[in-house]
């Protein structure tokens, strides 16, 4: 990602540079639908909501809504959905705006914030659980304050505690100086209708009296697994599960992750 630079002391040029970087973050290349992914959608009911967003539903029972991460697509959640459907849950997952079959606009944390709310409104029934991965989980949790999102239980898989991942990506890929990155931070924070300082203080993870499961991998190359510990410090009773060797995306396919979620959603019937 090559970008122009600005000279120190030129405030207007610095701001323009920061805005340029923020616009680049809005562009995301979504993962392709692979042949093995198509088989995961077999038997799922496909439908659309909110300006052509594409979603799938599998199973019957209490509603579990599932959110993929930045640059991903809904089918990444299909394996978990099918597993939970065996426990008599109705699981709905979708392609967020700018991703997969919903790739019609730019991407941002506000995309996940809006789409999770729109999906909930479309289905118009009580949500038993929200299950989110990475940036999708962060947007999902922020939607509680911003959009009135609610559920009986929440599951966050590899979710950054605040949106530091794009800042670290810009630092690594562009070599932008810290003064510029400091100007990008409030642009990102505005997507949460918040300040960067508030987000750093677990702003998106404002605790409530509902169970929260935090699932992280110690070898994750994008999201710090210690985020789980910091979130749990302010969320009474939060449960943490950590895996090893899966990284950021393959954790969604880990059998122990499915088992942990199944136990969390059905605590009265599982050890």
Image (cartoon, grey):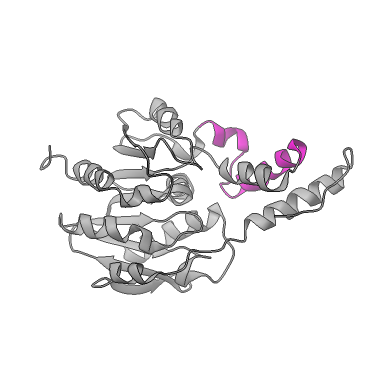
Q: Image point 30% across, 29% down: which residue?
A: 237
Quadrant in the rendering for residue 65: bottom left
- Report the side of 239 relative to 96 (left or right): left
**Residue at (66%, 43%) from the top-left corner?**
172
Horizontal side of 45 relative to 102 (left or right) equals left
Of residues 163 and 260, the one drawn nearer to the viewer in this rendering:
260
- Residue 156 in the image: state x and y as whole percent: 37, 43
| Quarter that holds the N terminus | bottom right
Report the residue at 21% width, 55% height from top: 84
Which one is nearer the viewer's eye here, 12 or 126?
12
* Residue 17 position within the rendered picture, expressed as x and y whole percent measured from the top left: 79, 50
Give whichever of 54, 236 is nearer the camera: 54
Q: Is residue 69 a member of the stretch shown in magenta?
A: no
How many marks can you see? 0
Most prominent secondary structure in the magenta stretch?
helix
Q: Is residue 204 above or below residue 70?
A: above
Residue 125 visible in image? no
Q: Is residue 186 magenta?
A: yes
Left or right: residue 170 compared with residue 209: right
The residue lying toward the viewer, choosing from 215 and 53, is 215
Residue extent of the magenta highlight:
177-201
Quadrant of the rendered image containing residue 35: bottom left
Task: Residue 217: tell me if it is visible.
Answer: yes
Q: Quadrant of the C terminus?
A: top left
Q: Is residue 180 above or below residue 82?
A: above
Q: Percent x, y for residue 61?
A: 18, 59
Picture coordinates of residue 43, whole percent (x, y): 23, 72
- Res 41 → quadrant: bottom left
């Amino acid at each position: 990602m090559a970008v122009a630079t600005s000279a120190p002391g030129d405030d207007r040029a610095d701001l323009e540079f920061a805005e340029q970087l923020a616009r680049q973050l809005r562009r995301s290349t979504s993962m392709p639908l692979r042949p093995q992914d198509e088989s995961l959608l077999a038997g799922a009911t496909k439908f659309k909501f909110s300006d052509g967003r594409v979603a799938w539903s599998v199973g019957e029972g209490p509603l579990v809504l599932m959110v993929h991460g930045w640059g991903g697509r809904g089918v990444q959640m299909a394996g978990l959905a099918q597993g939970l459907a065996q426990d008599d849950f109705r699981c709905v997952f979708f392609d967020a705006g700018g991703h997969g079959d919903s790739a019609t606009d730019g991407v941002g944390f506000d995309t996940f914030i809006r789409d999770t709310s729109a999906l909930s409104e479309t289905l118009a029934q009580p949500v038993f659980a929200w299950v989110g991965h990475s940036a999708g989980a962060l947007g999902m949790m922020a939607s509680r304050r911003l959009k009135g999102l609610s559920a009986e239980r929440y599951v966050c898989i590899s979710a950054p505690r605040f949106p530091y991942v794009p800042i670290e990506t810009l630092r690594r890929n562009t070599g932008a100086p810290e003064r510029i990155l400091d100007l990008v931070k409030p642009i990102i924070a505005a997507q949460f209708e918040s300040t960067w300082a508030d987000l750093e203080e677990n702003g998106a993870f404002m605790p409530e009296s509902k169970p929260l499961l935090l699932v992280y991998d110690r070898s994750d190359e994008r999201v710090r697994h210690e985020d789980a510990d910091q979130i749990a410090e302010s969320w009474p009773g939060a449960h943490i599960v950590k895996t090893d060797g899966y990284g950021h995306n393959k954790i969604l396919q880990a059998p122990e992750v499915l088992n942990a979620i199944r136990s969390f959603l059905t605590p009265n019937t599982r050890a």
